[in-house]
């Protein structure tokens, strides 16, 4: 247990899952030489993949492709199935292949007799010339290849035609003489829907969910596609935090706590010098921006606040506050100060080396690839600012049920809205379920409760 929980938006508008099985037509034991041409013809009239399955057929022009004009309910999706399947031949198929073709033998005998009669009148001189002609010896197969050919088991090819709904639609939409009809295509290869090898099968209606299921279907059912990156197991493995990442998140949260303490000290100094001591306390949030590549702190809200609020100090040690940025501008929150701190570094590089320099051009856009750590959940305004800053991750401690923009005030967080042009991962520290055996987490929880005690209840 890492002590950090990822905040994920609830699923919205998910499509209805595909059926487990679909009824389809299959051609079994196809001649290998006609597999390629037949597959190309079937791809034209009954394609496996279809870009648009929502349009209705036109009354003035017959449909060119059956799947093109059907809804998902009428024609099940078949783009996860492969067109051709190779399997071990059955005993009946092997027995049928071993029988001699009587018609072919008779035709070969007649052709041979006719050739002998034609060549009978030739002179012996021509025969001697033919014998003198050099003939290249036939290449002998390599021992390994010959052994593989002998040991290889006989196999057969099956071809997926289409779903029952798509095939029936094609049959009803086109006549047998139409070049777009299935019957016309099959007739080119001496086949027909009434052939014994035109059979109906129940095939998988979805891609395989695991590699084990893929292997089982490929061997005993039908070859299908497998999208590992779309499986729940793969997504969970990719999202799992490593021990190094957890340690860096602990470090980042501690840096945020230190920044919050520094910010509150700044508030007290400004309050004592410009206002009465009855002005009250300020719930200042600590925030730091870190580079996950090396774990260094790129920007702190307290440092940027000092640079903006003490711009006319006479000496570096002088504690003379001109203004308190958080008080002077309500939009100048700690989150915005930390982002401005990153921007300040980019301006310094541009001023020092020039905007045409390699150092500036090889830089990055604001917080691209950086991680942000906060002691308290950012509000919607700050969460969207982090979207525009292109941060990689946001980690916070205390959840804000009233104003939180990462799931605290609403089920959907700003970080994963589908309409935004950037998404980042968001985590929160488990305040009530931190590991008792982890001293660092326990210390963090206690520090956060002291900072934002009212918000933790």
Image: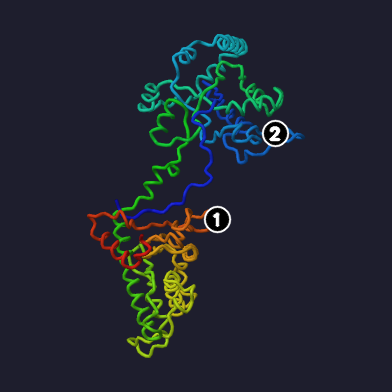
Frontmost residue, 416 versus 54: 416
Residue at 66 percent of width and 33 percent of height: 65
- Residue at the front extreme, as displayed: 278
Question: Left or right: where does residue 173 sit relative to residue 199?
Answer: right
Instruction: Give the foreground label among 1 and 2.
Output: 1
SS of the residue under disc 2: loop
Frontmost residue, 391 versus 345:
391
Give percent across and percent down for residue 184. Answer: 67, 24
Instruction: Name the residue tied to disc 2.
Output: 63
Q: Is residue 358 visible?
A: no
Of marks 1 and 2, which one's residue comes earlier in the chain?
Answer: 2
Q: Could you say where residue 130 lies in the image, as x and y percent from the top left?
A: 53, 20
Tell me where residue 283 sits by quadrant: bottom left
Check residue 196 in the rendering and tell me which mark sits there, or answer none.
none
Q: Residue furthest right?
A: 60
Residue that carries the numbered disc 1 in the rendered image: 419
Q: Residue 339 vs residue 78: left or right?
A: left
């Amino acid at each position: 247990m890492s002590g950090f929980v990822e905040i994920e938006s609830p699923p919205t508008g998910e499509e209805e899952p595909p059926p487990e099985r679909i009824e389809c037509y299959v051609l079994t034991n196809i001649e290998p030489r006609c597999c390629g041409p037949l597959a190309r013809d079937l791809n034209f009239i009954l394609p496996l993949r279809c870009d648009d399955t929502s349009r209705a057929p036109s009354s003035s022009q017959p449909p060119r492709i059956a799947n093109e004009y059907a809804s998902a309910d009428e024609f099940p999706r078949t783009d996860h199935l492969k067109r051709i399947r190779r399997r071990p031949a059955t005993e009946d198929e092997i027995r049928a292949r071993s029988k001699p073709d009587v018609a072919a033998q008779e035709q070969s005998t007649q052709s041979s007799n006719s050739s002998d009669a034609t060549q009978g009148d030739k002179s012996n001189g021509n025969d001697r010339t033919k014998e003198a002609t050099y003939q290249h010896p036939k290449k002998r197969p390599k021992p390994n290849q010959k052994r593989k050919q002998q040991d290889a088991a006989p196999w057969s090819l099956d071809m997926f035609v289409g779903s029952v709904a798509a095939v029936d639609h094609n049959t009803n939409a086109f006549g047998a003489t139409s070049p777009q009809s299935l019957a016309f295509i099959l007739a080119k290869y001496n086949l027909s829907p009434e052939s014994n090898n035109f059979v109906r099968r129940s095939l998988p209606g979805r891609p395989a969910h695991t590699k084990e299921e893929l292997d089982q279907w490929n061997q005993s059912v039908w070859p299908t596609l497998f999208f590992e990156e779309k499986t729940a197991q793969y997504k969970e493995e990719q999202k799992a935090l490593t021990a190094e990442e957890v340690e860096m998140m602990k470090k980042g949260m501690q840096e945020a706590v230190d920044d919050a303490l520094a910010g509150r000290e700044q508030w007290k100094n400004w309050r004592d010098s410009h206002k009465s001591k009855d002005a009250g306390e300020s719930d200042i949030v600590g925030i730091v921006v870190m580079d996950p590549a090396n774990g260094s702190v790129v920007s702190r809200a307290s440092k940027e606040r000092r640079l903006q609020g003490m711009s006319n100090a006479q000496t570096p040690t002088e504690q003379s506050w001109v203004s308190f940025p958080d008080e002077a501008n309500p939009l100048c929150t700690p989150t915005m100060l930390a982002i401005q701190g990153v921007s300040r570094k980019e301006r310094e590089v541009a001023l020092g080396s020039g905007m045409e320099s390699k150092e500036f051009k090889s830089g990055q856009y604001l917080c691209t690839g950086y991680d942000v750590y906060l002691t308290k959940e950012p509000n919607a305004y700050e969460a969207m600012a982090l979207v525009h800053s292109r941060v990689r991750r946001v980690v916070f401690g205390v959840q804000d049920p009233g104003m939180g923009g990462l799931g605290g005030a609403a089920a959907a967080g700003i970080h994963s809205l589908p309409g935004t042009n950037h998404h980042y991962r968001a985590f929160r520290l488990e305040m009530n379920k931190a590991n008792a055996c982890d001293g660092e987490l326990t210390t963090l929880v206690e520090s956060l409760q002291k900072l934002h005690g009212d918000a933790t209840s």
